[in-house]
Image (cartoon, rainbow, N blue to C red):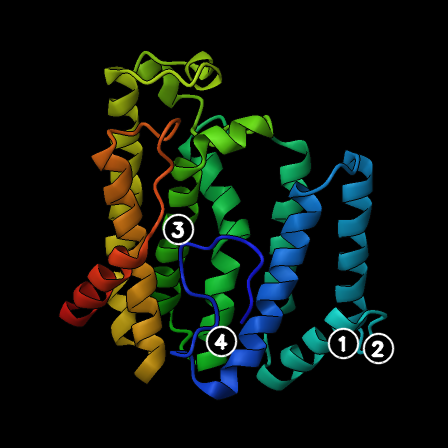
């Protein structure tokens, strides 16, 4: 599918079974467009929250069995009905995007994880519902992968998020490593900053590895899709570590050679 944003990881690629590509695309467009409401353009916070509230109202219509007022939600209603998807998962996503409008700092790691629970984990859970893989263990593994992916994006985009006055590194981590937000503002790398980033990288890597066994629970090509996603996340972490956490001057991202590496590593999973 065409994607207007740079993505580290595959979205509804050819590896996804054909019958599920459209449902995944619809879910992606819902999440992407809602995220853009919170992040993109020059709308005021009040305008952003009002637009997200309109999305919530459309979900309310779907929940009541009424016809949505927009094409996006008409498609979403069809996907929800066909695949019995839990509407609260979509509500969680909107709640996280609304939080992005008004909250720019996270006191500690548990608070950040709670945000990830709503901003990232619902997408993985929706995919598992599409495949009928919803055991407690499978949902837990999916949550680990999705939270790890969210954290990886945070560590990758420290400098970019600063331009939006957002800091996702937990506030309690700064003094422990003797760095501060002033280092982000000045694009100032140091050995202490590298140590902080190593700490955050280890957190994301541990989550990703805990969730990785999920690839064996998903059938056929989808298992390979998740393999590439897991390996893509781990590769970005490697890239961040290679530049010793200097995401100010060298934002790590995946290139053509990396995808060859990901293919080989996915085979070994």
Relative to residue 84, is residue 17 drawn left or right? left
Q: In the rendered image, which quarter is residue 229 located in?
A: bottom left
Compared with 83, 267 (above or below) is: above
Residue 128, horizontal then vertical, whole percent: 44, 73
- The mark nearer the N terminus, 2 or 3, is 2
Residue found 28% across the figure and 71% down from its top: 215
Total numbered labels:
4
Frontmost residue, 166 versus 159? 159
Q: In the rendered image, which quarter is residue 17 located in?
A: bottom left
Distance between the Cα atoms at labels 4 and 3?
19 Å
Pointer 1 residue: 74
**Picture quarter with the C terminus:** bottom left
Whether residue 219 is visible, yes or no, is no
Asked if marks 3 and 1 touch (Cβ < 8 Å), the reply is no
- The mark nearer the N terminus, 1 or 2, is 2
Q: Nearer the viewer, mark 2 or mark 3?
A: 3
Residue 28, horizontal then vertical, whole percent: 57, 65
Tell me the element at label 3.
helix
Residue found 29% across the figure and 76% down from its top: 217
What label does residue 67 carry, if any? 2
Asked if marks 1 and 2 touch (Cβ < 8 Å), the reply is yes
Q: Nearer the viewer, mark 4 or mark 1?
A: 1
Pointer 3 residue: 149
Distance between the Cα atoms at labels 2 and 3?
34 Å
For disc 2, the neighbor class at 10 Å (few under 14, some 14 to 19, many from 20) is: few
Distance between the Cα atoms at labels 3 and 1?
29 Å
Frontmost residue, 115 versus 198? 198
- The mark nearer the N terminus, 4 or 1, is 1
Tell me the element at label 2.
loop
What label does residue 129 carry, if any? 4
Compared with 159, 22 (above or below) is: below
């Amino acid at each position: 599918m065409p994607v207007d944003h740079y993505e580290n990881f595959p979205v509804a690629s050819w590896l996804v079974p054909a019958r599920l590509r459209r449902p995944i695309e619809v879910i992606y467009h819902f999440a992407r467009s809602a995220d853009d409401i919170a992040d993109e353009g020059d709308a005021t916070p009040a305008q952003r929250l009002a637009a997200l509230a309109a999305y919530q109202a459309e979900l309310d219509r779907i929940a009541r069995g009424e016809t949505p007022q927009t094409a996006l939600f008409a498609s979403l209603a069809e996907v929800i009905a066909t695949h019995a998807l839990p509407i609260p998962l979509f509500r969680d996503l909107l709640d996280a995007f609304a939080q992005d409008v008004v909250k720019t700092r996270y006191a500690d790691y548990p608070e950040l994880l709670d945000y990830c629970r709503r901003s990232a984990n619902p997408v993985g859970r929706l995919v598992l519902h599409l495949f009928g893989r919803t055991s407690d263990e499978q949902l837990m593994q999916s949550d680990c992968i999705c939270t790890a992916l969210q954290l990886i994006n945070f560590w990758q985009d420290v400098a970019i998020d600063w331009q939006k006055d957002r800091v996702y590194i937990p506030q309690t981590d700064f003094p422990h490593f003797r760095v501060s937000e002033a280092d982000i503002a000045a694009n100032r790398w140091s050995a202490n900053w590298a140590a902080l980033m190593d700490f955050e990288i280890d957190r994301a890597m541990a989550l990703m590895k805990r969730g990785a066994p999920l690839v064996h629970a998903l059938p056929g090509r989808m298992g390979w899709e998740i393999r590439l996603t897991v390996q893509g996340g781990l590769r970005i972490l490697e890239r961040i570590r290679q530049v010793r956490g200097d995401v100010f001057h060298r934002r790590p991202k995946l290139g053509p050679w990396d995808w060859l590496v990901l293919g080989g590593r996915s085979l070994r999973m």
